Every structure is written in C-alpha cells, then in structure tokens.
Image (spheres, grey):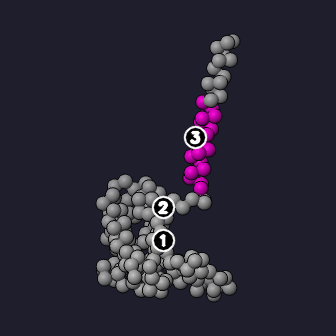
C-alpha cells in the first residue's frame, strides 16, 4: 500500500509532463499568431522605386518574372482601403523545381513570392518566407545547397533597395 501511494506522485508527474508535451506540440503546430519563417528588410526607397529596382535586378540576373499583384488596387476595387502592398512572383525554374521534385507540396511556396508593403509610418518593407523555414515546412532535407542559393539570390535582390 505504501508503494502505491509513493508511486502516485511519480505517475501524476509523468502524466502531467506528457500532457504538457502534447499540448506544447499541438500549440506550436497551430500557432496562427506566429511570424515564424517571415523575413523582412526595410527599404531605403519609396515603394514604386523599390518595385522598379527589384524588377530590374530580377531581369538583370536572368530570373523569370511571373507576376505583379497590386494588392492595394485589388482592395480598392473591392471598396476596401489597404496600405500600399504589391506582391512580386518570380523564380528560376531549374532551381525552384528541385524543391518541388523533393516534395510536391513545396509547390505551395514556389515560385518565390516577395511582398513589398508600406506600414503606417510610411516605411517600405520587402517581406518573404525564409527558405530554411520552407525546407522544414516541407521536410526537404536533400536540397541544402539549393536552399542556400535561393537565400543568397533573394538577399541580393532585396539589397538593391536597402541603399538610396
């Protein structure tokens, strides 16, 4: 009987620890308020110039430009006021498709999406999803060099707007 009483706190502690671990795991997967994977770079130039510089650098690098979405115009057309926000979609198919061949679900994150947005203070930001985070999201472990290359390219592209 003493043995049963002595083991209850240990069983209770073990049960609470397991419950905590399960809740922690569930919470980290479902955290909608998290900014995990978001990279932001402050622009030194106005939004329109930032867009022009980035598009010119993409072209100069021989990267395929797919799409420009003026999100604030779309919002205005729907009767909604939105701060200036433009999404640029571009990529290098020989590089980007390597992620998709590793895991087809990675197509959700390719080609590259770069958001240029202006905050309430008038500051312009280039925002994208971190490529290491994308690799983890899609459990891609066999394309490290390609993810490193994608990171270097996007940093090079956004560097065109960090100086006047």
C-alpha span from label 2 to label 1: 10 Å
User: Foreground: 83 or 137?
Assistant: 83
Q: Is residue 27 magenta?
A: yes
Q: CA distance from mark 2 to mark 3?
A: 23 Å
- Left or right of 29: which side holds 55? left
Viewer-proximal residue among 82 and 136: 82
Q: Earlier in the sequence, mark 2 or mark 3?
A: 3
Q: Is residue 145 left or right of residue 1?
A: left
Secondary element type, mark 1: strand
Q: Quadrant of the N terminus?
A: top right
Which callout, 2 or 1, points at the residue further toward the start of the chain? 2
Q: Quarter-wise, where is residue 8 in the image?
A: top right
Residue 33 % position (x, y): 60, 60
Which of the marked residues, 1 or 3, is nearer the chain's N terminus?
A: 3
* Residue placed under numbered mark 2 in the picture: 37
- How many marks on residues? 3
Q: Position of residue 108 (x, y in %)?
A: 48, 66
Q: Which mark is residue 83?
A: none
Vertical comparison of 118 with 13: above or below: below
Tell me what residue is drawn at x 44 percent, y 63 percent. Answer: 130
User: Where does the magenta region start and end?
Assistant: 14-31
Residue at 62% across / 29% down in the picture? 13
x then y, percent, for residue 42:
46, 73
Dot 3 crowding, Cα within 10 Å, few <14, some 14–19, many 20+: few
Q: Give the residue pinned by disc 1.
A: 127
Q: Quadrant of residue 155?
A: bottom left
Residue 109 visible within the image: yes
Check the image and report above or below for 113 versus 140.
below
Mark 3, residue position: 21
Residue found 55% across the figure and 80% down from its top? 122
Queried whether the magenta region covers residue 96, the answer comes back as: no
Which quarter shows the C terminus?
bottom left
């Amino acid at each position: 009987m003493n043995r049963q009483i002595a083991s209850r706190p240990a069983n209770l502690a073990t049960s609470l620890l397991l419950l905590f671990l399960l809740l922690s795991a569930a919470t980290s997967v479902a955290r909608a308020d998290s900014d995990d994977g978001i990279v932001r770079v402050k622009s030194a130039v106005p939004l329109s110039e930032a867009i022009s510089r980035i598009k010119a650098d993409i072209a100069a690098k021989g990267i395929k430009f797919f799409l420009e979405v003026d999100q604030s115009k779309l919002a205005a057309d729907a009767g909604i006021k939105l701060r200036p926000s433009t999404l640029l979609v571009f990529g290098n198919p020989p590089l980007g498709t390597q992620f998709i061949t590793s895991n087809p679900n990675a197509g959700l994150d390719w080609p590259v999406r770069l958001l240029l947005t202006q905050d309430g203070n008038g500051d312009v930001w280039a925002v994208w999803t971190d490529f290491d985070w994308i690799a983890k999201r899609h459990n891609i472990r066999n394309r490290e060099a390609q993810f490193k290359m994608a990171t270097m390219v996007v940093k090079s592209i956004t560097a065109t707007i960090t100086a006047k």
